[in-house]
Amino acid sequence: MTHIEETQPARPLDTVTAGVTPTTRYVALIAVVVVISGGIALTSGGYWLSNFTQAYCMALTLMGCALLYGQLGLVSLCQWALLGCGGWVALRVYHWFHPPFFVTILAGGVGASVIGMIWGLPALRMRGLYLALVTLMLAGAFQTLITIMSFPVGGPGFLGQVPGADDRIMMARPIYAAGDTAYFLFVAFVTLLAILLVEVHRRSKPGRAWALISKNEQMAMASGVRVVFYKAWAFALSGFLAGVGGALLAGLFGQLDASAFAPTDSIVIFIGTLLGGTEFWLGSFLGGILTRFIPALLIDFNVNTYVGFLIFGAALLLGLRDPVGIGGHLTTLVERLYTKYILRRGS
Amino acid sequence: MIKIESLTVQFGGVRPLDGLDGEFNAPICGLIGPNGAGKTTLLNVLSGFVSPVKGSVSLDGVPLRSLSPVGRVSIGLRRTFQQEQVVGELSARDNIQAIADHISGSRHAAREEIDRAMDFVGLTGRANVPGRLLNLYERRMIEIGKTLIGKPKAILLDEPGAGLNETETEGLRALLLRIPDTFGAQLILIDHDADLIASVCIETMVLDFGKLLAFGPTRAVLDDPVVRRAYLGTA
């Protein structure tokens, strides 16, 4: 006698975590970011606080990269360049209009999003290696362009350049975030908003559309999903996050250095994304910290920073073998502990 | 009603469909044939994934050729795939919600349609279970549930019974028979299970090497000696 196949027995982890409401997840997310950021603000200062601020800016960029790769399988190798684009637009807008700092950040995000879209739209019908190459070309083009144009420093005209280094005008931080610690907390707040923005996307209409596209594009189309539109949406959001990161970085230093935007850095961002993990927000957060701190630690230990490429190369091999990444493993561990707690409380 | 006229598809030197004509009028129609007969190619042409070199297809008098795959969904064409396509990370309900997001009129309408579809396929109690934890039968039910969203006119089912055991196939059979009356949609069913085809399909089209071998009332078609030789392997 045959019978309807028994459902695969659910693991306790799945049973408990499936019952966790989105609100609980959002509260947990906010709590984790607040605790980590608060801890950093209380214990760090000077050089390390600056590094943590940069790490958060990078985490924003990694978040966009993780969104594209984790949700849609799109390899974008221009995220660092998009961060630069965001920084350029933010500096340009700041020196022209001196708007409130939030507006400057938004301008950076929107600017990078638009630039990324203009470049990315023709490439959005591509996947895998082809998209990776096209986006790497954008990173290369940006480096060439920014070397010629440089970042605006308060001079006249569109490019905003000045004749001497002493004539440069720095981008001022907002009054409420003028100090290093206050600025770090401000960056942490913006990062938290960005994480929430991505999580809301992942758990709503676009996230479901991305899940279908990732599973099978034909099936997605047969489900009424406009594939190019939703890919473009992801690309725009990813560019926006990188642009916001660039604007915040510009706010940290008051200016940006044109020599710091090599295409290889975009590859490092992608590796950091894989290392942190693409499926959980925590992955981008940790990936950003690692991406910033590996070079910083090498400098601190007087080791040639090119050794960093060896470390990132090894990390890439690890990341490709284990796409869940450090963030995924940590999240699973926390969920497992939570499950044990719930089951113990239940019994 | 799906109408096919002089449909020819060519991939290089191969013609998976060659001058095919036919009109599916019955509420549940079968599409059978040996492997490589062109059944899935026909579904791909109807869905807009394959462009014919000649001929036309229409749904309720609306020519499909100029419509994109998404455009075809918006006029009421739905389909499932040979390999089940449930997203493991999404819950059972979210898998159905993912299509409702794009074709249901409003949030309220979407919620009602999802509830109705979940209830119809018997998965209301499993709504929050991630797709990866559902068994094959449940995943097939989710696939069918997706096709019931947003006033479907024609549903193309590509081997929904593949891999199901007898009891599950019986459940599938009962479900399929209820769809036309409950949802007002026509079913076009591809399956290798001749018993399933015989018990649910009123008329059946048989393809062989991209050509029409037989088309008519299912019992008569399945009893046709030519069909039995080509498809069932018996005289």
Image (cartoon, rainbow, N blue to C red):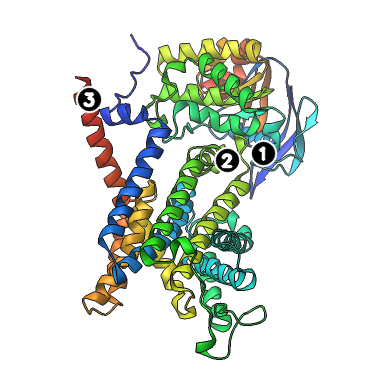
Considering the numbered disc 2 on the image, is that residue within a helix, a strand or a loop? helix
Q: Residue at x 55, y 74 (%)?
A: A142
Question: What whole-number distance in Å separates the C-alpha atoms at marks 3 and 2?
Answer: 41 Å
Could you tell me if the residues under marks 1 and 2 are in contact, i.e. CB atoms within 8 Å?
Answer: yes
Q: Residues within 10 Å of mark 3 (few under 14, many from 20)?
A: few
> Eyeballing the image, is A277 above or below B223?
below
Q: Chain of mark 3?
A: A
Considering the numbered disc 3 on the image, is that residue within a helix, a strand or a loop? helix
Could you tell me if the residues under marks 3 and 2 are in contact, i.e. CB atoms within 8 Å?
Answer: no
Q: Chain of mark 2?
A: A
Provide residue B66's location: percent of width, then percent of height: 77, 41
Q: Residues within 10 Å of mark 2 (few under 14, many from 20)?
A: many
Provide residue A137's location: percent of width, then percent of height: 53, 70
Q: Residues within 10 Å of mark 1 (few under 14, many from 20)?
A: many
Q: Is residue B162 visible?
A: no
**Circle number at residue B20:** none
Q: Quadrant of residue A346?
A: top left
Q: Which amino acid type is marked by label 3?
A: Leu
Question: What whole-number distance in Å separates the C-alpha atoms at marks 1 and 3?
Answer: 47 Å
Residue designated by label 1: B69
Residue designated by label 3: A343
The front one of A49 and A223 is A49
Q: Quadrant of residue B60?
A: top right
Q: Residue at x 61, y 39 (%)?
A: A225
The quadrant of the rendering that contains the N terminus of chain A is top left
Residue designated by label 2: A218
Looking at the image, residue B32 sits to the left or right of residue B74; the answer is left
Q: Residue at x 54, y 53 (%)?
A: A237
Question: What whole-number distance in Å separates the C-alpha atoms at marks 1 and 2?
Answer: 9 Å
Considering the numbered disc 1 on the image, is that residue within a helix, a strand or a loop? helix
